[in-house]
Amino acid sequence: MGEDQRQETWYAHCDSWQPITNARAIPDRRRQHELATPIPVRVRLIWQRDGTELLDTIAVGWAGQLVHVQVRDVRVRIGFAWVHAEHVVRR
């Protein structure tokens, strides 16, 4: 298999990973509610090294004042984050 045909592994971007400082801990499963239809939102993320960023994405759930948003970015391992509702607005 040629160099250009190699499949990228999950660990390939580990040097890029960084915490989202305004992300909250995953709430207890009993408090979580999934949305039947994801809602388009703009979320304010604060990266540990890169600072503040506004991201157009989707909300997929909520738990009290926390919103579960999708984060498709090589800097985050999981692909989702829980953030306080004050950082999220509908698009």
Image (spheres, grey):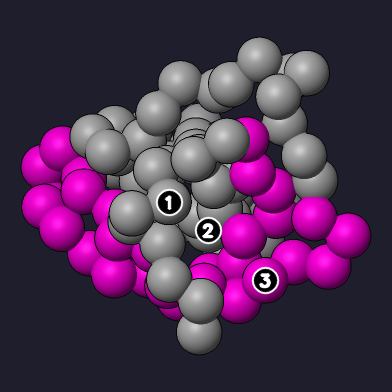
51 relative to 91 in the view: left or right: left
Range shown magenta: 35-63
Looking at the image, the residue that sits furthest to the bottom is 91
Q: Is residue 13 visible?
A: no
Residue type, label 1: Ala
Magenta run includes residue 19: no
Crowd around label 1: few <14 · some 14–19 · many ≥20 (10 Å): some
- On residue 34, which mark appears? none
26 relative to 75 in the view: left or right: right
Asked which quadrant contains residue 3, the reply is bottom right
Q: Secondary structure at mark 1?
A: helix
* Residue wearing tag 2: 72
- On residue 39, which mark appears? 3
Crowd around label 2: few <14 · some 14–19 · many ≥20 (10 Å): few
Residue drawn at x 51%, y 76% is: 90
Q: Secondary structure at mark 3?
A: strand
Where is residue 47? Give x, y as percent.
21, 45
91 or 20, which is in the foreground? Answer: 91
First in sequence: mark 3 vs mark 1? 3
Q: Secondary structure at mark 2?
A: loop
Distance Cα–Cα, label 1 vs label 2: 19 Å
Where is residue 52? Give x, y as percent.
15, 58
Asked which quadrant contains residue 37, the reply is bottom right
Q: Nearer the viewer, mark 3 or mark 2?
A: 3
